[in-house]
């Protein structure tokens, strides 16, 4: 257990940030899954910028690695362009 006031505060703030990061990461994963399940190409193309924005925000906050963000965006773009 932490012995200093600053360490105790750091533990509290880390826990709060961890929960916030988990929430946004899970929300983004759900949005990605929903985008993949859309069968209409037009609708998917309109949703893509929203999901890409969410991925970029996670990358900017270092919740996910920037390369993973790029890979996810590339995969989604390729998937949508292949839809009929």
Image (cartoon, rainbow, N blue to C red):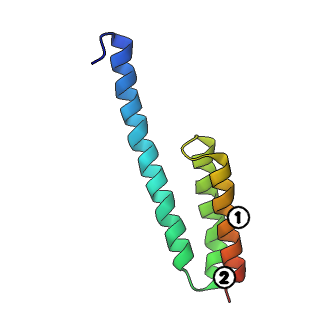
Please, is residue 13 above or below residue 76 in the view? above
Quadrant position of the N terminus in the picture:
top left
- N-terminal label among 1 and 2: 2
Q: Position of residue 83 (x, y in %)?
A: 67, 84
- Residue located farthest toward the bottom when viewing the structure as drawn: 84
Q: Position of residue 48 (x, y in %)?
A: 64, 68
Horizontally, residue 13 falls left or right of residue 79, namely: left
Point out which mark residue 58 bears: none
User: Which picture quadrant has residue 77?
Assistant: bottom right
Q: Residues within 10 Å of mark 1 (few under 14, many from 20)?
A: few
The correct choice, above or below, for 6 with respect to 33 in the image is above
**Residue named by callout 2:** 42
At 63% from the left and 56% from the top, the residue drawn is: 53
Q: Is residue 78 above or below residue 20?
A: below
The residue depicted at 33 percent of the width and 11 percent of the height is 5
Judge the density around disc 2: few (<14), some (14-19), many (≥20) Cα neighbours within 10 Å: few
Q: Report the residue marked by disc 1.
A: 74
Quadrant placement of the C terminus: bottom right
Percent of width and height locating residue 36: 56, 75
Residue 62 is situated, as x and y percent measured from the top left of the image, at 58, 40
């Amino acid at each position: 257990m932490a012995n200093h006031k600053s360490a105790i505060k750091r533990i509290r703030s880390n826990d709060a940030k961890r929960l916030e990061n988990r929430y946004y990461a899970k929300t983004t994963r759900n949005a990605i899954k929903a985008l993949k399940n859309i069968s209409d190409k037009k609708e998917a193309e309109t949703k893509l910028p929203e999901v890409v924005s969410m991925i970029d925000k996670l990358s900017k906050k270092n919740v996910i690695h920037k390369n993973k963000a790029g890979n996810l965006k590339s995969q989604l773009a390729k998937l949508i362009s292949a839809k009929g």
